[in-house]
Image (cartoon, helix red, strand yellow):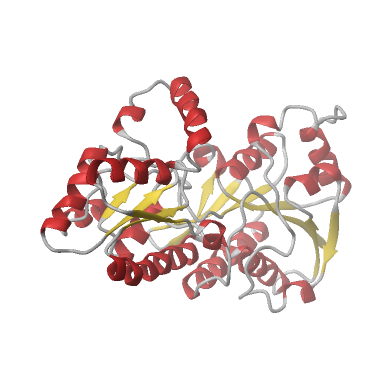
Amino acid sequence: MIKRIGLLTSGGDCQALNATMRGVVKGLSNSVENLEVYGFDDGYKGLIYGKYRMLTSKDFSGILTQGGTILGTSRQPFKLMRVPDEKGLDKVEAMKQTYYKLCLDCLVILGGNGTQKTANLLREEGLNIIHLPKTIDNDIWGTDMTFGFQSALEIATNAIDCIHTTAASHGRVFIVEIMGHKVGSLTLNAGVAGGADVILIPEIPYDINKVAEAIQKRNKAGKRFTILAVAEGAISKEDAELPKKKYKEKLAERAKKYPSVSYEIADQIQQVTGSEVRITVPGHMQRGGEPCAYDRVLSTRIGAGAAQAIMDEEYGVMIGVVNGKIKRVPLAECAGKLKMVSPKDQLVKAAKQIGISFGD
């Protein structure tokens, strides 16, 4: 009997996508005599427009250490999935037809929150779906860890490490902007690991005067520099109190003057303290390079867990990690939920205990 599975990677890329797909296919290859694997090009776009190719064992050889994704990826917003494309194509129906055309037993989808919501939509439409949690933000509800996070963390931490020497040499204030629009897990962990003096994350709105106080306190103590780890989505207390519509309007206005929140914060710091401020944005470097050893192991475990779920014919689940163990989490329970950083998180408390300011 032939087992047919589809694979697609959607949303932003990260270092361990290939390693995870390898785990799925190797896990199945050792249990299934006749296995057919179809890879969809550029995420959901390939599923919608029927762009795919059959993959062989050779395609998964040597990719454990390879970053990015051999299938390519794209962003297909969940909120537009029910909206016909420019030619009037029903995207959801098109995805279903591609699935049925290939007689797939299961579609394995690797991606973050938006990807997961569409995966759940396809589950609701009757397809056999397994979702694997990928994101450098580690913000997917229902799993302790996402693959890609630890690799990105090493890069973000290294960026802060590198800034230390030049900051000390010139006696400046440096801002390192870390990826994370809604959740600050990457910034929090990189900030602590890199020895940042101030950490600003979306979950803890900041007061710029408190940030300035932290900088001035270091200056009075004879410290020549201050390093801030700032999440892309860091938000001031004033902005956090605005209605959602008003905040979006303010972001649009800010974009006319500043490339990102870090530049606005730098301008405010210079005005309040008179300190010279420099900004470093590692950007997409955080998604690039080889997966770290932790992610290679995690991806292999998650991939093998997906293979076993397919063998057990248990679909409609995300393969996550809970208390160190691989667990099948129903998509209906986790789709659409974000795992935020709690202001009472133990790491936040530890960071404050050693003197790191969150500007609150």
> Could you tell me which quadrant the N terminus lies in?
bottom right
Which residue is pictured at 41% across the width and 20% down the height? 243
**Vertical arrangement, residue 57 with respect to residue 311, above or below:** below
Task: Between residue 110 and residue 331, name the one nearer to us.
Answer: 110
Which residue is pictured at 25% across the width and 37% down the height? 207
**Vertical arrangement, residue 276 with respect to residue 243, above or below:** below
Q: Is residue 8 left or right of residue 276?
A: right
Image x and y of residue 295, in percent: 51, 68
Task: Tell me which corner region of the image, top left, top right, bottom left or bottom right, holds residue 165.
Answer: bottom left
**Vertical arrangement, residue 203 with respect to residue 350, above or below:** above
Which residue is pictured at 70% across the width and 74% down the height? 30
The extreme left residue here reads 221
Which residue is pictured at 46% across the width and 67% down the height? 155
Task: Between residue 309 and residue 199, name the one nearer to us.
Answer: 199
Q: Is residue 198 left or right of residue 31?
A: left
Task: Tell me which corner region of the image, top left, top right, bottom left or bottom right, holds residue 187.
Answer: bottom left
Image x and y of residue 139, in percent: 45, 48
> Could you tell me which quadrant the C terminus lies in?
top left
Q: Is residue 15 left or right of residue 228?
A: right
Image x and y of residue 248, in percent: 49, 26
Task: Between residue 179 and residue 263, name the one nearer to us.
Answer: 263
Q: Is residue 84 left or right of residue 143?
A: right
Q: How many marks?
A: 0
Image x and y of residue 219, in percent: 16, 57
